[in-house]
């Protein structure tokens, strides 16, 4: 859902995280839970594997590999086309099951305010890029660029590419759009410190007191705190 790769010096650039910032949900977890519940045998496989693999999820050097092992085992035999179809189906049911309340109401107001001002808007997420695109299409959110983690076919299963987290968000914006700083950054997470660092206006959403102290220590009065419901 890219608008244009051309960025000019006159563009006001606005960057939103997705999970926890625009939406209160962990969207990929919601999708994956639905995917497994429709396929009980794959859920059983995950339950069997988790006790063995769980410790490796908490070791930084093995986290990504472990996630991909679990994902591959649960998607063996699933085509990438079917995977995307499942995401499309999920996006509409996700909205219906939550009475259309899949976004913080203030987040959509803020996003639309930036659109009305003609700002260039990016949503950048650690979740699946296709999944975020599907959710935004279903919610009729257009005219924005979406960047997320890729999903790739691998030996008859599915794995993630490089996950779009932390410094990878900054690299993705640089590599795909040749921008290395932005006017506004909205996030709920300390993992997005690299994203906040390059923003003129640094906005934290629904921050915990401990996180806010760390942010104020690093950025001082540059941090703005918003509470969204």
Image (cartoon, grey):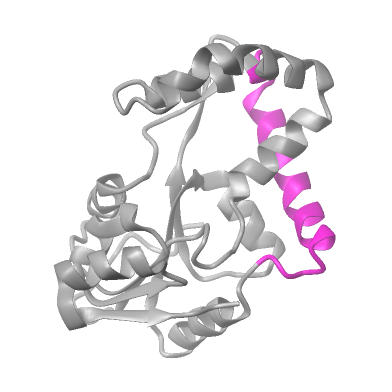
Q: Can you see residue 85?
A: no
- Occupied quadrant, residue 36: top right
Can see residue 171? yes
Instruction: Report how many numbered discs are placed on residues in the image.
Output: 0
Residue 84 lies, with reference to residue 218, above or below; the image says above
Q: Residue at x 42, y 64 (%)?
A: 188
Q: Is 98 a magenta residue?
A: yes
What residue appears at the point 51 percent right and 46 percent down from the top-left corner?
127
Given residues 64 and 175, the one toward you in this image is 64
> Which quadrant holds the C terminus?
bottom right
Q: In this view, does 183 lie to the left or right of 49?
A: left
Residue 15 locus on image (x, y percent):
36, 68
Q: Residue furthest front?
A: 210
155 left or right of 189 in image: right
Main SS, magenta region, reads: helix
Give residue 114's position: percent from left, percent from top: 44, 84
Q: Position of residue 218 (x, y in %)?
A: 15, 67
In the rendered image, the vertical position of residue 89 relative to residue 51, given as above or below: below
Q: Is residue 215 magenta?
A: no
Q: What stretch is highlighted in magenta?
A: 74-102
Please provide percent x and percent y for residue 163.
39, 37
Q: In this view, does 134 lie above or below 197?
A: above
- Front-most of residues 217 and 174: 217
The residue lying at 72 percent from left, 46 percent from top is 88
In the rendered image, the vertical position of residue 13 relative to residue 109, given as above or below = above
């Amino acid at each position: 859902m890219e608008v244009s790769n051309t960025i000019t010096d006159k563009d006001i650039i606005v960057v939103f995280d997705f999970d926890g910032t625009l939406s209160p949900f962990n969207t990929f977890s919601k999708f994956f839970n639905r995917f497994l519940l429709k396929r009980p045998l794959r859920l059983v496989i995950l339950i069997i594997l988790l006790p063995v693999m769980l410790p490796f999820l908490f070791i930084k050097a093995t986290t990504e590999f472990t996630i991909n092992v679990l994902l591959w085992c649960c998607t063996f035999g699933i085509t990438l086309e079917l995977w995307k179809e499942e995401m499309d189906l999920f996006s509409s049911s996700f909205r219906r099951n939550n009475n259309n309340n899949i976004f913080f109401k203030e987040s959509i107001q803020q996003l639309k305010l930036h659109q009305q001002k003609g700002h260039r808007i990016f949503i950048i997420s650690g979740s699946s890029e296709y999944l975020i695109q599907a959710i935004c299409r279903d919610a009729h959110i257009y005219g924005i660029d979406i960047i997320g983690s890729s999903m790739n076919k691998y030996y008859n299963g599915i794995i993630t590419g490089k996950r779009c987290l932390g410094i990878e968000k900054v690299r993705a914006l640089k590599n795909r759009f040749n921008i290395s700083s932005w006017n506004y950054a909205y996030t709920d997470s300390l993992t997005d410190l690299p994203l906040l660092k390059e923003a003129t206006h640094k906005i934290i959403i629904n921050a915990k007191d401990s996180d806010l102290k760390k942010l104020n220590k690093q950025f001082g009065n540059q941090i703005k705190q918003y509470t969204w419901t």
